[in-house]
Image (spheres, rainbow, N blue to C red):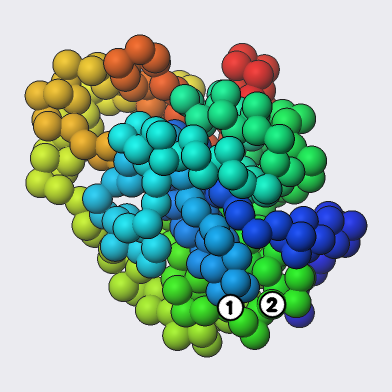
Amino acid sequence: MITKVIPEEKITAVLKLIKKSSKIVIVAHKRPDGDAIGSTLALCNFLIGQGKSATVILPDAIPSFHSGLPGAKDVVCFETQESEARALINESDLIFCLDFNFPSRIGALEAPITESRAKKVLIDHHLNHGEFTDVIISHPEISSTCELIFRLICRMGYFPDMSLETAQCICTGMLTDTGGLAFNSNSPEIYTIISELLKKGVDKDAIYRNAFNNYSESRMKLLGYVLYKKMRVLKEYHTAIITLTHDEMLRFNYQPGDTEGFVNQPLSIDHVFCSIFIKEEKDVIKLSFRSQGDMDVNIMTKELFGG
Ligand code: MN
């Protein structure tokens, strides 16, 4: 048995919206990770199975190591297929916003999505959320959006209909957002869900290999470089900081998604409980925080950066 995390009235509301919609768009955040891609593709695959016309639109390209996921080939990339994406958004009657909390997280998609008159549903697990959708399903205590998608599909009564492809996508996000069930994964129900996905025929080990052991040579060299040259360990604060400049990324032939997971690396050092990764992108500095044990970076990011 799995507890009812999402309130009943929200399940009913989403089911009602799905039933009366025919053209559905699903979006996720910029520089999509395994959970953003897995959750959007899982929901899209499920909706298509229910006879809906559903399309995933992402602000930018899917990293190559996730491009083999079921449905990834049909994803519309706003950066390179803007007019097609705009047409789909204009025609849509329902928009799902997955794995992000504020519209600014979807970059150039922000205006077309927020201005659309379609009904909107937010499903996310980040801390805090904006008020830009008709239904808000926000659960920071859940370790991945993919887990929320699994819970949603089950609670709407469609678990028997769940395809292997949907299950594979859900498993991808559950694994990537927990480092392969290495952190944020103390909830026993995660394993109940993984067990159900395995029963659907999912090859968890293959999904793990694909998500974690499928990097390019230049990504590996970039990781080696940042750990050797750019990581500073502040012992008295049990904290490690890695910085990476745009020039350095170019030097190592950076591809989207290449720095995914970098922030987790210092946590494998004895007595390092907090890790901060600071990356300079074209027009913005991106900070990622991770902690383990009793240290909670959520409090820090909330107090210093508002989330
Ligand atoms: Mn996520």
Where's residue 288, x and y in %? 45, 29
Q: Is mark 2 within 8 Å of ligand 1?
A: no
Give, as a three-letter code, the residue at label 2.
Answer: Tyr
Local SS, label 2: loop
Say which residue label 1 marks. Answer: 162
| Vertical relation: 61 (above or below) 183 | above
**Picture residue at 73% right of the left edge, 31% below the top:** 132
Q: Which residue is at a point 35% across and 38% down the rendered structure image? A: 81
From the image, which quarter does the C terminus lie in?
top right
Q: Are marks 1 and 2 in contact (CB under 8 Å)?
A: yes
- Side of 76 relative to 301 (left or right): left
Residue 289 on image: x %, y % = 49, 30
Q: Which residue is mark 2?
A: 158
Cβ of mark 1 under 8 Å from ligand 1: the answer is no
* Residue 87 as seen in the image, left or right of residue 217: right
Amino acid type of the residue tagged 1 in the rendering: Met
Q: How many marks?
A: 2
Residue 189 pos. (x, y %): 67, 69
* Residue occupying image coordinates x 29% and y 46%: 63
Camera-side residue: 26 or 257? 26
Q: Residues within 10 Å of mark 1 (few under 14, many from 20)?
A: some
Q: Residue at x 79, y 41 (%)?
A: 134
Position of 150 with respect to 285 (left or right) is right
| Badge 2 density bin: few <14, some 14–19, many ≥20, Cα 10 Å | few
Task: From the viewer's perspective, tell me whether residue 223 is left or right of residue 264.
Answer: left
Residue placed furthest toward the right = 9
Give percent across and percent down for residue 147.
61, 61
Q: Is residue 298 above or below residue 58?
A: above
Of residues 119 and 210, the one nearer the viewer is: 119
Quarter holding residue 227: top left
